[in-house]
Amino acid sequence: MIPECPGTAEATTLLRTALDDIGLAETAFTVGIIDADEATQTRGFAGSPASMVDGTDLFNSEETTSGSLACRVYPTPEGPRNVPALRDLRRALKEPAARATRISP
């Protein structure tokens, strides 16, 4: 997260809510601070706030540009916002959660 970007505090609350909603209430997360262009390139950071699982941005797409020390805007049903819609974050979190719980023979 870039501290000066709007949505930083809201994104933290939103992530906790989404994890709780999909049955991952015990899952901890960390909030990282990005304050240098080099870090954005290394991490493939597409703007703040970002939700990442195992180094992968849950909302990175061909429309977003990796390596950006900038504030981010998400499309939501209510229009552009500085955080994703809760339903979209839940959906984005479910795939990595499903992969983590699959049992291999």
Image (spheres, rainbow, N blue to C red):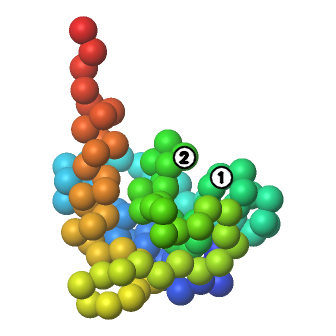
Point out the residue furthest to the bottom here.
79
Residues at badges 2 and 1 in contact (C-beta under 8 Å)? Answer: yes
At label 1, the amino acid type is: Arg
Front-lying residue, 68 or 61: 61
Per the image, the residue denoted by label 1 is: 43
Q: Is residue 66 left or right of residue 80?
A: right
Per the image, the residue denoted by label 2 is: 55
- Quarter assignment of residue 10: bottom left
State the quadrant of the C terminus.
Answer: top left
Q: Earlier in the sequence, mark 2 or mark 1?
A: 1
Point out the residue furthest to the top here.
105
> Quick check: 104 above or below 37?
above
At label 2, the amino acid type is: Gly
Position in image of residue 69 (x %, y %): 69, 72
Front-lying residue, 10 or 88: 88
Q: Is residue 86 left or right of residue 40?
A: left
Q: Is residue 16 left or right of residue 70?
A: left
Position in image of residue 78 (x %, y %): 26, 90
Instruction: Sort mark 2 into few (<14), some (14-19) or many (20+) by Cα contacts within 10 Å.
Output: few
Position in image of residue 31 (x %, y %): 55, 61
Q: Secondary structure at mark 1?
A: helix
